[in-house]
Amino acid sequence: MSGDSVGAFLPGPPVEIAGAADGPLAGLTFAVKDLYDVAGHVTGYGNPDWARTHPPAVAHAAVVRQLLEAGARLRGKTKTVELAYGLTGENVWYGTPLNPAAPDRFPGGSSCGSAAAVAAGLVDLAMGSDTGGSVRIPASYCGIYGIRPSWGAVSLVGACPLGPSYDTAGWFAARASVLRRVGEVLLPPGPEAGLGPLLKVQEAWVNALPATAAALAPALSAAERVLGPALPVNLAPEGLDVFYEHFRCAQAEEAWTTLGSWIAATEPRLGPGVAERFAAARAMDPAKAAAGRAFRRVVQARLRPLLAGGAVLVHPTAPGPAPKLGISLAEQTAVRERTMGVTAIAGFAGLCEVTLPAARVEGAPVGLSLSAAPGRDRALLAAAERVAQALGLPV
């Protein structure tokens, strides 16, 4: 795409489609992660062998159609980590997008291109997907708003799968009001108010780097002004490392079940990190995956009653700012583990989670997350907009 100074979009001719003449999103532009179908174009899923072995899409993905019908104009397809299986945003085949908010750091993934496009002001909004953090983490790293909707709330028809019982169709925006307006188009009807009290997830605050927790203190205060004093809660007595391990195993089994037949038949070239994760998924011990599924039921039974009355969880989206470019694979893995122990909370329980661009650490963005019970997405988006206003952020 012309003017793509950050490498957010796929190389080649731009994929541009005009939206309806009028509608609730008229005048806005959007991009879509290259795992959503756009009619007449191959969905590449971040990997050249996937693109080579799949024909052009015959119809738009449901969310693409909904956004076009709402009046938004499609400006292009954005890069993704291969097969959506990574949190740094690296893609060795098409190039890793620049993080516009911190050029010496990763943009976050797997929805790297969508986050970069919004952060650079190339589009007003962009579709990503979030299985284990793939919208929330790049939103935090790039200093923009992002939402992982309640599991099953937004259609994934016409989207490439990774872990179907965790996959969600999330999106990014540079303004809280735009994030909410997209939700009015994509989300099913639901309550739009009635949230509170605020619950401070102690483990996630302890897990964050001290500088992150300190930088987010004003944002926590702003959330308290909107939703009331934060009550400390402990949600993970087993430890966040246990959350990460169970999520990793359960997700890996799904990833291999979903994509393994294509990988085995095609023997695709996979970049560093992604290749190792699929190798681990292929070798996953069924007992570990079963333990992960059982743990998920425990987390759901713990969290859903707690949040049923409208309570909102608040915590740092990620433990720190984006890792710097060039760190080793081992260092990347350590960041992934520390990060996904927290993102697994909403992932296991199917919660909706919004991240706000709330602060900066070492000059790089860090996000504050608000999470609510499944089905309270609209109310959460409205509350996030009010918190953003209280904090003086772009609304």
Image: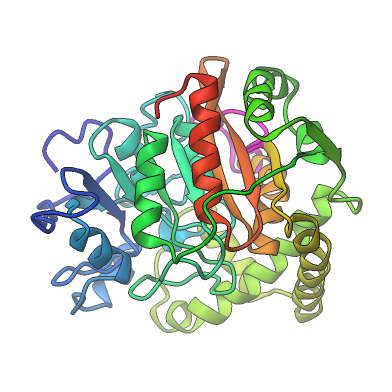
* Residue 33: x %, y % from top left: 33, 55
Q: How is the image coloured?
A: rainbow
Residue 362 highlighted magenta (yes or no):
no
* Residue 2: x %, y % from top left: 11, 38
Q: Residue furthest right?
A: 237
One can see residue 122 in this view: yes
Q: Is 39 positioned to the left or the right of 181 in the image?
A: left
One can see residue 324 in this view: no
Which secondary structure type mostly characterizes the magenta part of the structure? loop
- Please name the residue shown 66% across and 58% down the image: 373
Q: Is residue 366 above or below residue 269?
A: above
Q: Compare residues 346 and 363 and report the one nearer the observer.
A: 346
* Residue 220: x %, y % from top left: 68, 26
* Residue 389: x %, y % from top left: 48, 25
Residue 330 highlighted magenta (yes or no):
yes
- Please name the residue shown 74% across and 41% down the image: 197
- Please tell me in which quadrant of the rendered image residue 391 appears: top right
Q: Residue furthest front?
A: 194
Q: Is residue 267 above or below residue 387?
A: below
Q: Compare residues 222 and 76 and report the one nearer the observer.
A: 222
- Please tell me in which quadrant of the rendered image residue 229 appears: top right
Count of numbered tags? 0
Q: Is 263 positioned to the left or the right of 55 in the image?
A: right
- Please name the residue shown 12% across and 59% down the image: 20
- Please name the residue shown 46% across and 59% down the image: 84
Q: Is 44 positioned to the left or the right of 72 in the image?
A: right
Q: Which residues are magenta?
A: 316-331
**Quarter of the figure that contains the C terminus:** top left
**Quarter of the figure that contains the N terminus:** top left
